[in-house]
Amino acid sequence: MAAQPLAARAPRATIEPDLPLADAARLTFAIAVAAMMYYETAAIAGEIEPLHQMRVATRRLRAIVQLFASALHGSRVHIYKRDLPWVGQAAGAVRECDVIEALIRECGSGLDPALAGALKPLCDSLAADRTAAHSRFVAELHTKRYTRMCGRLANPLLRRALPTTDAGQSAPAMIAPIASSARKAGQHISQDAPPELFHRLRVRVKRLRYGLEMLSAMGGKRSRKALQRLEQMQELLGLHQDAVVTMAWLRGYAGTTVGAPPETLMAAGAMLEALIVRRKKLAARACRQWRKIERSNVMDDALGEISRAAEQRLESGRQALADAAPAERIDAGPDAQADASDATTLDGRELTEATPSEKVPPLAEAKPHTEGQKAQQELPIAQVEPGAEDEHPLAESVAVEPVTPTPDPAATSDPDDSPSTTLIPTNG
């Protein structure tokens, strides 16, 4: 029974900025995996667009892996970077056949009618390649490796120690490495650069675009402008890569096919020449578009917008904590507030901040009220007799009889019970 055509596309994964980083990662992965599996049945049936969308879903998952790389366990990152390209390449082999066929038909329409009529053997060979590639793709989807990969993606293994910030506050650190990677790739392209460098830039621009789309809740006008420019750049680089892939296939067909009609080989040669010219024009346009992106600073503007939004979230969080502190003291009751006030007074006061009435007179200026106390005070410090240290320095108005303390061996053996030499002001 043929699969029913899909009525709509699966929802795209976006990062919820209000969620904690771990919860945002789990939710984003779950939505992206569901999107990939949404197209699975139709892709197995051989439909062109669902297979393409399934390949796009694997690319978005790879962008998610890079976005949350700091939150994912290192072993899972290794598995994701190994298995997602494996599925993407299996789907890509089928997708390339569809792209090549469309481009051959487009180029064939501009050929001489006699040569255009000789394209049938070439199209038949391409159809056979697609059938073989699709069979391999379907076989890959029925392996335990694919099943395990989907399970691991749906339930990502995260690091134990994660930042306490939410996903919105972590957004600048998540997107910055992807933008830096795209910039580095753009530095190496020129009109004469090899096709591999254009393809590398295409992959990184696409990943940056996916990342900005998933962080759209943190962006605004500048992010939308950057997405528009990046999408245009991706379109040019995609056309360039389509020409490169078609040229490689035509060369392979002409060099390996035995018994191909001469007219078919001539038509393949004519299309190859046209594609060479087309690729050069696309390379020049892509270079101009990238330089335009660099001069306009749209990427920096988008990253700055996300950073400002993250900073506002951090400031709001700090303000919320500051506002919550007085409320907690009120809820604790008057006794707890009085204790907190006393603790703050004693802990926060220093001798240098005491008022003149609170200052403690030096030991030499304290007035003795008894002759015994006067005699003890006139003794040198090393000869102070027992009981003198019990005299409070502020007791100026009350005469206290000296009391000889009873020695306590247990008390004198603990250093924490020894008399302190620090003078602590009191409020009388």
Image (cartoon, rainbow, N blue to C red):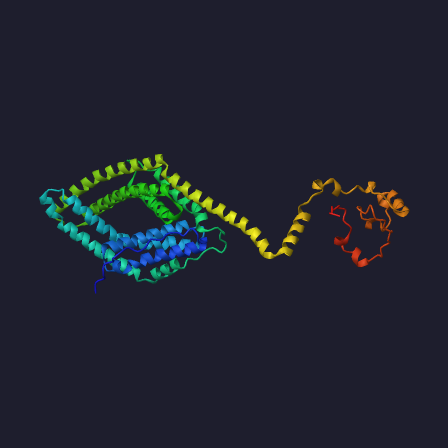
Residue furthest to the top in view is 295
Q: Is residue 254 visible?
A: no
Does residue 120 sit above or below 282 in this rendering?
A: below
Residue furthest to the front in view is 334
Q: Nearer the viewer, residue 253 or 96?
A: 96
Quadrant position of the N terminus in the picture: bottom left
The image quadrant that residue 134 belongs to is bottom left
Q: How many marks?
A: 0
Horizontal arrangement in the rendering, residue 334 relative to residue 275 (left or right): right
Q: Is residue 360 visible?
A: yes
Horizontal arrangement in the rendering, residue 114 relative to residue 62 (left or right): left
The image quadrant that residue 409 belongs to is bottom right
| Residue 398 position within the rendered picture, expressed as x and y whole percent measured from the top left | 83, 48
Q: Nearer the viewer, residue 22 or 144?
A: 22
Residue furthest to the right in view is 371
Does residue 291 sit above or below 124 in this rendering?
A: above
Q: Nearer the viewer, residue 391 or 276?
A: 391
Q: Nearer the viewer, residue 153 or 244?
A: 153
| Residue 363 position within the rendered picture, expressed as x and y whole percent measured from the top left | 81, 42
Residue furthest to the bottom in view is 1
| Residue 265 position within the rendered picture, expressed as x and y whole percent measured from the top left | 14, 45
The image quadrant that residue 238 belongs to is top left
Residue beneath the point at 16% across and 50% down: 122
| Residue 298 position within the rendered picture, expressed as x and y whole percent measured from the top left | 36, 38
